Image: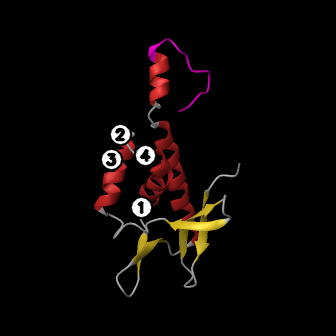
Amino acid sequence: MAKDKLVIVESYLGEYQLQWYIAETQDMGAVLGDSCSKTQDPVLLKWALALDRGEVPEEDLEHCAAQVGAASHPYTEMYSGASGTVSGFYWGSKKDVQEALRLAMLRIKEAKKKVPWPQWARDAVAHGWKPPKGWKP
């Protein structure tokens, strides 16, 4: 089964954004930063803390971690539309967006290490089950 992935998208203005490619529908999904109002948004700080504690729901984990990672790049900017709506982070050069992508992927990898075990696995361990080598929740 194909997995969703982050891809670099060049805007019509010649700037770059990171956007999810949804494998199941073969379509583009959310743009990183589209739910933030600025790169130092309190939402990002909340997500960063939740990621560090392993408290992010599994379905939000990759997007949340990617946004936190990409926002940490020093040249991350925000698109703001005329109506005040935000349409995500952007970078002015290919080199910067590639580095932001690397930071996003690194943050996703770190976050996945902190995913809590499902309740069934905790119960099984309490009853003597030993996970196979390489098993991850």
Q: Which residue is mark 3?
A: 49
Disc 2 vs disc 4: which is toward the camera?
Answer: 4
- Image: magenta residue range: 126-137
Q: Amino acid at mark 3?
A: Leu
Q: Crowding near pointer 3: few (<14 within 10 Å), some, many (20+)?
A: few
Vertical comparison of 68 with 11: above or below: above
The extreme bottom residue here reads 82
Look at the image and name its color scheme.
secondary structure
Mark 2 and mark 4: Cα distance apart in space: 12 Å
Kind of residue indicated by mark 1: Ala
C-beta proximity under 8 Å, tags 3 and 2: yes
User: What main secondary structure does the magenta stretch of the protein show?
Assistant: loop
Q: Quadrant of residue 24?
A: bottom right
Q: Residues within 10 Å of mark 1 (few under 14, many from 20)?
A: many
Mark 4 is surrounded, within 10 Å at the Cα level, by few (under 14), some (14 to 19) or many (20 or more) other residues, namely few
How far apart in space, not on screen, are marks 3 and 4 (Cα)? 13 Å
> Is 135 covered by the magenta stretch?
yes
Q: Which residue is mark 2?
A: 53
Residue plotted at (44% across, 34% down): 116
Of tags 2 and 1, the one toward the viewer is 2
Picture coordinates of residue 73, whole percent (x, y):
44, 61
Q: Nearer the viewer, residue 94 or 56?
A: 56
Residue name at image x 45 percent, y 23 percent: 122
User: Mark 1 and 4 residues: CB-CB less than 8 Å, in contact?
Assistant: no
Residue picked out by circle 1: 71
